[in-house]
């Protein structure tokens, strides 16, 4: 998943690019690329294998491919469970030719660029999760006060009130973890402290906790609304569908746990 007008994914070695008479010739395909086929998409950034290093590992570089370049096709958009407002396509490249100058950054630095984008993206996904939890809390509170059963609001029932209390706890914990990771990134950018290792760990922790909390929050909110929570006319139904992808994009929950374990010094594979 990427920013508007720029698509990229982890399948770098599935796409190859070779230099030919001052042009990159790109071939291959990519999956699950965000904002890659909208009306305002001007370019996509492609991580591609551009050679082999002396130690035998792939050399990965990043190449800019303008929309409309012959041989570049944004295939039909995916029919997704959630995030229907997000433009997501598979991409294919068949002898796509772009100028050598379309190399983004240094040759062979594409994988490092991609990983850096993932670290920042994890904080962004965490922020999305915080917003989702906040919305679940706000709407659950309102509904619990308005919905009347057996002569009073449903919010007076401990079984429901305790669940909404859990939303409050998850919200504050998620927001603080996200702010912590974002503050580390800001400090690094300003040169006032922090290390990449610390930031990577903080971003993984924030992403893991907030996204899993968001999925739980949408389940709770749907339950608070009861039958109405299952109806598309209420936003909590959309939240329930949308939240799941937060545990997947920018590295799955399993990947975050692996990164956190490695950050703790565990030799996890």
Image (tube, helix red, strand yellow):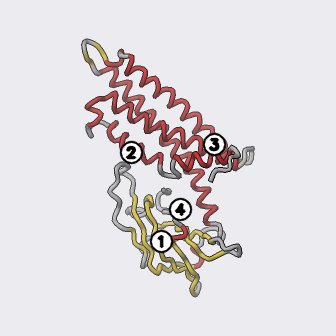
- Mark 3 or mark 4: whose residue is earlier in sequence: 4
Circles 3 and 4: CB atoms closer than 8 Å:
no
210 up-or-down from 66: above or below: above
- The residue that label 1 is drawn on is 66
- Closer to the observer: label 1 or label 3? 3
Q: Residues within 10 Å of mark 2 (few under 14, many from 20)?
A: some
- Closer to the observer: label 4 or label 2? 4
Q: CA distance from mark 4 to mark 2?
A: 22 Å
Residue 185 visible, this orientation: no
Is 241 on the left-hand or right-hand side of 207? Answer: left
- The residue that label 3 is drawn on is 202
Q: CA distance from mark 2 to mark 3?
A: 24 Å
- Mark 2 or mark 1: whose residue is earlier in sequence: 1
Is 196 on the left-hand or right-hand side of 88? Answer: right
Q: Residue furthest bottom?
A: 21
- Mark 2 or mark 3: whose residue is earlier in sequence: 3
Q: CA distance from mark 1 to mark 3?
A: 35 Å
- The residue that label 4 is drawn on is 10
Q: Nearer the viewer, residue 23 or 209?
A: 209
């Amino acid at each position: 998943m990427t920013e508007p007008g720029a698509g990229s994914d982890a399948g770098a070695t599935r796409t190859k690019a070779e230099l030919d008479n001052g042009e990159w010739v790109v071939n291959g395909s990519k999956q699950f690329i965000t904002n890659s086929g909208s009306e305002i998409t001007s370019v996509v950034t492609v991580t591609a294998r551009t050679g082999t290093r002396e130690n035998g590992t792939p050399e990965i570089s990043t190449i800019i491919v303008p929309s409309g370049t012959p041989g570049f096709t944004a295939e039909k958009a995916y029919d997704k469970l959630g995030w229907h407002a997000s433009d997501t396509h598979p991409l294919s490249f068949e002898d796509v030719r772009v100028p050598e100058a379309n190399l983004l950054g240094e040759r062979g630095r594409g994988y490092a660029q991609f990983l850096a984008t993932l670290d920042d993206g994890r904080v962004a996904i965490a922020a999305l999760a915080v917003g989702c939890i906040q919305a679940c809390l706000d709407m659950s509170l309102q509904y619990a006060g308005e919905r009347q059963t057996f002569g009073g609001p449903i919010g007076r029932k401990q079984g429901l009130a305790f669940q909404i209390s859990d939303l409050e706890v998850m919200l504050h914990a998620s927001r603080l973890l996200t702010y912590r990771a974002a503050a580390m990134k800001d400090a690094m950018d300003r040169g006032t402290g922090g290390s990449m290792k610390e930031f990577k760990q903080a971003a993984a922790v924030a992403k893991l906790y907030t996204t899993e909390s968001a999925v739980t929050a949408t389940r709770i909110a749907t339950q608070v609304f009861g039958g109405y929570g299952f109806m598309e006319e209420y936003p909590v139904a959309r939240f329930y569908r949308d939240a799941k992808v937060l545990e997947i994009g920018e590295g799955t929950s399993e990947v975050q746990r692996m990164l956190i374990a490695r950050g703790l010094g565990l030799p996890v594979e």
